[in-house]
Amino acid sequence: MRWKLLIEYDGTPFAGWQRQEGQPSVQQTLEEAIEAFAGERVVVHGAGRTDAGVHAQGQVAHVDFAREMEPQKIREAINAIVRPLPVSVLTVEPAPEDFSARFSATARLYHYRIMNRRAPPALERHTLWHVPVPLDAGLMHEGAQTILGKHDFTTFRSAACQAKSALKTLDRLEVWRQGDVI
């Protein structure tokens, strides 16, 4: 049976989403948790791959395993096993066999935060980038509007990229300041 998972994680202790030999990953953490209660080897497929130290809110994934369970029991089992790591399964629901977390996705939303002050952040140091020199959020927003639309991102992807096309569409790009955070 195929299951759709909605997850969030703090990427600080991980080498990224994708399983990597000898390094902790979010994918490996979830696979080992599911294998522990399902009793079979599984592969968890994410809608996207995050890099080392990158966090996710609302990451969609899917996994197949034969054991029949109630969705909330699956969620509770995974969350109990992965604790104390900063990974949480928010929801689990049955999915059609042709559902793919990656290829069924119609859009992705990215959120970047910049702490713009002289003093470095102590409490949020793992969730934002620190830039100690003054930045003009209005000018940044204005400049960002010039890259809206469809563009070829070939030069920004790795040689191992598996995406069918480097053409991507940026529908919205907003930059604003709220206190010291852009």
Image: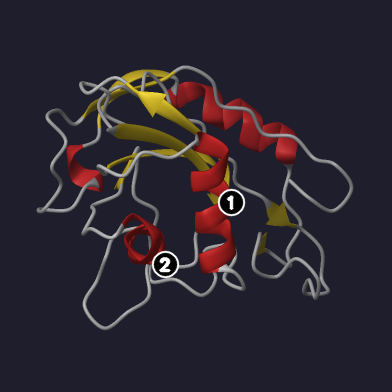
Q: Amino acid at mark 2?
A: Ala
Count of numbered circles on the image: 2
Q: Is residue 104 left or right of residue 107?
A: left
Dot 2 alpha-carbon crowd within 10 angstroms: few under 14, some 14 to 19, many 20 or more:
some
Residue at horizontal 16 percent and vertical 36 percent from the top: 163
Mark seen at residue 89: none
Residue at horizontal 30 percent and vertical 49 percent from the top: 44
Residue at the far right: name it: 179
Q: Which residue is mark 2?
A: 52
Residue at horizontal 49 percent and vertical 36 percent from the top: 70
- Colour logic: secondary structure
Horizontal and vertical percent position of residue 7: 52, 45
The reply to whether residue 110 is visible in this rendering is no
Q: Is residue 134 left or right of residue 76?
A: right
N-terminal-most mark, 1 or 2: 2
Q: Amino acid at mark 1?
A: Glu
* Secondary element type, mark 1: helix
- Tell me where residue 38 sits by quadrant: bottom left
- 170 or 71, nearer to the observer: 71
Horizontal and vertical percent position of residue 43: 23, 52
Horizontal and vertical percent position of residue 81: 52, 67
Answer above or below: position of 102 versus 9.
Answer: above
* Secondary element type, mark 2: loop
Q: Which residue is mark 1?
A: 76
Q: Is residue 154 left or right of residue 69?
A: left
The reply to whether residue 131 is visible in this rendering is yes
Q: CA distance from mark 1 to mark 2?
A: 26 Å
Horizontal and vertical percent position of residue 1: 27, 33
Dot 1 alpha-carbon crowd within 10 angstroms: few under 14, some 14 to 19, many 20 or more:
some
